[in-house]
Amino acid sequence: MSKMHITTTINGEPTEFLCDPSQSLLDVLRDNLGLTGSKEGCGSGDCGACSITLDDRLVCSCLVLAPEAEGKKIETVEGLAQGEHLHPLQKKFVEFAALQCGICTPGFLVASKALLAKNPNPTETEVRFGLAGNLCRCTGYDKIIRAVMEVAAEMRGAAR
């Protein structure tokens, strides 16, 4: 099987890579490109640990074939921080202790950013629904939900 040449944009940077036609985008991100933030929790799209955005659509990268990235815009958890400056979601996850082992955290951060991009004023129910595709076995969800709600309020300029 011959390798495919893929041209895409990852976290704002033009990127090219070679991949097998059957290789998952998660495997390419982690193994070929060294972007190890996205985790493989289940390999079947059930846990959300590998969440990324593909053309601003939240997807499980373990379910996307790498060739599908051709010409697309990809954002991973590595794209959240700007150098040493953490994204507000990252800051609040730390402040609210909304993480423990860290396997699910990158997926929750990417999913939270995607949620707030579409709905900057979510209710708690909308946050819970928006993050329902992400599973956590360590922290529970309350700290994560509170952190996302606080960031939403701050981003609207209505910090509590």
Image (cartoon, helix red, strand yellow):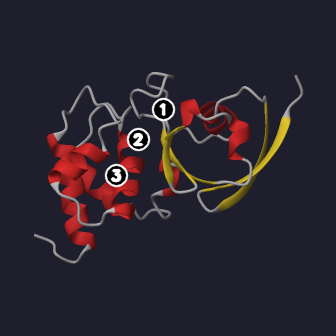
Residue 95 in sight: no
Which badge, 2 or 3, comes first in the chain's sequence? 2
Looking at the picture, tell me which residue is in the foreground, 152 or 94. 152
Residue 73 screen position, x and y as percent: 63, 56
Q: Residue at x 15, y 72 (%)?
A: 159
Quadrant of the rendering where the N terminus is positioned: top right
Name which residue lies at 22% across and 44% down: 128
Q: CA distance from mark 2 to mark 3?
A: 8 Å
Relative height, residue 21 to residue 83 (above, below)? above
Q: Earlier in the sequence, mark 1 or mark 2?
A: 1
Q: Residues within 10 Å of mark 1 (few under 14, many from 20)?
A: many
What residue appears at the point 23 percent right and 28 percent down from the top-left corner? Answer: 138
CA gap, disc 3 and disc 1: 16 Å
Q: From this viewpoint, which residue is outermost toward the left?
A: 160
In the image, what residue type sits under mark 1? Lys
Identify whether 15 is placed above or below 42.
below
**Residue tagged by mark 1?**
39
Percent coordinates x, y for residue 98 in the rendering: 23, 43
- Mark 1 touches mark 2? (CB < 8 Å): yes
Return the residue at label 2.
107
Q: Secondary structure at mark 2?
A: helix
Q: What is the x, y in percent for residue 94? A: 26, 50
Horizontal placement of 5 versus 14: left or right? right
Q: Which residue is mark 3?
A: 112
Residue at point 34% right, 36% down? 134
**How packed is label 2: few (under 14 Cα within 10 Å), some, or many (20 or more)?**
many
Element type at marker 3? helix
State whether residue 101 is above or below residue 118.
Answer: above
